[in-house]
Image (tube, rainbow, N blue to C red):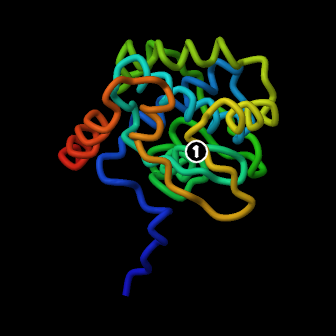
Amino acid sequence: MRLRLPSYLEPVQGFQPQKAAELCALLISFSGGKIEKLKLIKIIYLTERQHLADYEEPILWDEFFSLPHGPTASAALNCIDGVLFPELTQNYFALHRKRDVCAVSQFSEIDCEFLSDAEIGSAKLVWERHKTKTASQLRNYTHKECPEYFELEHGRRSISYQDVLSAVGVSDPEEIAEEILSFRQLRQ
């Protein structure tokens, strides 16, 4: 009998693990080859948020959750932790002492096969805006500046695409969120 992962550890339908691995590797390269896990996952979330604001489309097609340390792209976090797609992500980065994420080889935007120029641009924009912030400062920033986030002491609470799209000021967030969810089901 095969053990089943808890649902929050399984990738959502349509999640793009190759893009997640490349986005992590790209952000790690921006930081010089090593970054705190908390900072990385906050930058990933903010990149997804920026891309949704600019293009009304996600990069990773992930699920978002409010966690005690702020909003998170769930499957991306599980990839960083080595729970999902370890055979893929080990070619890009490694988690060191459960706190730092390190590059396993040099990586730059010219190495991106799966991320589009627009997606790379969103990552660069967010990185430039937040690169000097510490992980704790980014945690606090997302608590204050992301109205879709729900403050929690324990556990997790879903953040819908509609919540994010509304928070970033996209017109007709309900219709766009429905399109994203429909399209995500086709991306399996």
In this view of the protein, which residue sits in the foreground, 174 or 119?
A: 174
For disc 1, the neighbor class at 10 Å (few under 14, some 14 to 19, many from 20) is many
Number of numbered discs overlaid on the protein picture: 1
Residue 163, percent across and down?
Answer: 46, 40
Residue 17, percent across and down?
Answer: 40, 43
Tell me the residue at 54%/53% (across/down). 78
* 182, above or below 36, in the image: below
Tell me the residue at 72%/48% (across/down). 69
Residue that lies at the very extreme toward the front in this rendered image: 172
* Residue of label 1: 72
Is 13 left, or right, of 166 in this rendering?
left
Residue 75, percent across and down?
Answer: 48, 50
| Amino acid type indicated by mark 1 | Thr
* 139, above or below 85, in the image: above
Report helix, strand or loop for mark 1. strand
* 167, above or below 188, in the image: above
Is 38 left, or right, of 105 in this rendering?
right
Residue 54, percent across and down?
Answer: 41, 17
Tell me the residue at 70%/41% (across/down). 37
Tell me the residue at 21%/41% (across/down). 183
Q: Quadrant of the N terminus?
A: bottom left
Residue that lies at the very extreme toward the bottom in this rendered image: 1
Q: Quadrant of residue 162?
A: top left
In this view of the protein, which residue sits in the foreground, 110 or 187?
A: 187
